[in-house]
Amino acid sequence: MYTIHINLQFQKLSKWIIDRVMSAIALLILSPLMLIIAIAIYINMGQPIFFCQPRPGKDGRIFIFYKFRTMTSEKDKEGKLLSDEHRLTPLGQFLRKTSLDELPQLWNVLKGDMSFVGPRPLLVEYLERYSPEQARRHQVTPGITGWAQVNGRNLIPWEERFALDVWYVDNQSLQLDLWIMILTVWKILKREGINHPEAVTMFEFKGNL
């Protein structure tokens, strides 16, 4: 039992180091591409360049989550935002299909708010809607990609996504993380599971009714 605990601690430390080293390297290498994307967003949609939103991380701790902006801020006559379908631009659609909109999360990884692999950080208001079992997804640091993302992403029901997240919590390892990263690259190249067939974003999770 003691050996297992030491091994788990070693893997956690290794993951912590790998996350920070790799995110720093990735930010340096990808900074020209990120600058080009930022300029394209500014020309296409104006400011802001980034989509910033509070999200719950490990143990429910709130942090600011970053993505490249993919939607306009168009509103109707009553001042309400138009639907996601109407606000998603062709550039934004391209960024989502290629997952390039996720690149700013490398900064979240470097800061320690996120990891490369882990359950995706969702909305703060979902915290009170989880069952005790579903809430276990917050026992680990959230990730840019995760077990649910390579097993259906936005095409599977919330309950199944959360079950996959909890499975990852119980089975996490460096080997599993490597396999998830490989599958993520494959999914991005195939452009699978980006959008739900009936919406450009995932439907809201309203709790376990």
Image (cartoon, rainbow, N blue to C red):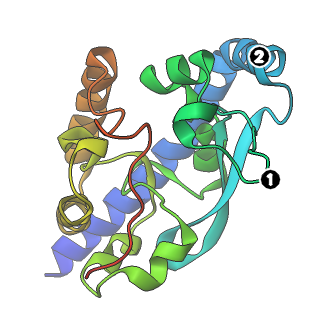
Circles 1 and 2: CB atoms closer than 8 Å: no
Which residue is disc 2 drawn over?
Answer: 44
At horizontal 21% and vertical 66% (from top left) the residue drawn is 159
Q: Is residue 103 visible?
A: no
At horizontal 79% and vertical 47% (from top left) the residue drawn is 77
User: Which quarter of the picture shows residue 11?
Assistant: bottom left
Name the quadrant of the C terminus: bottom left
Q: Which amino acid, mark 1? A: Gly
Q: Which label was assigned to residue 79?
A: 1
| Tally of numbered discs | 2
Name the quadrant of the N terminus: bottom left
Vertical side of 93 occupied by 162: above or below: below
Extreme residue toward the right, this view: 47
**In this orientation, which residue lies closer to the viewer: 109 or 6?**
109
**In this orientation, which residue lies closer to the viewer: 138 or 156?**
156
Vertical side of 16 occupied by 141: above or below: below
Mark 1, Cα crowd under 10 Å, few <14 / some 14-19 / many 20+, is few
Vertical side of 139 occupied by 14: above or below: above
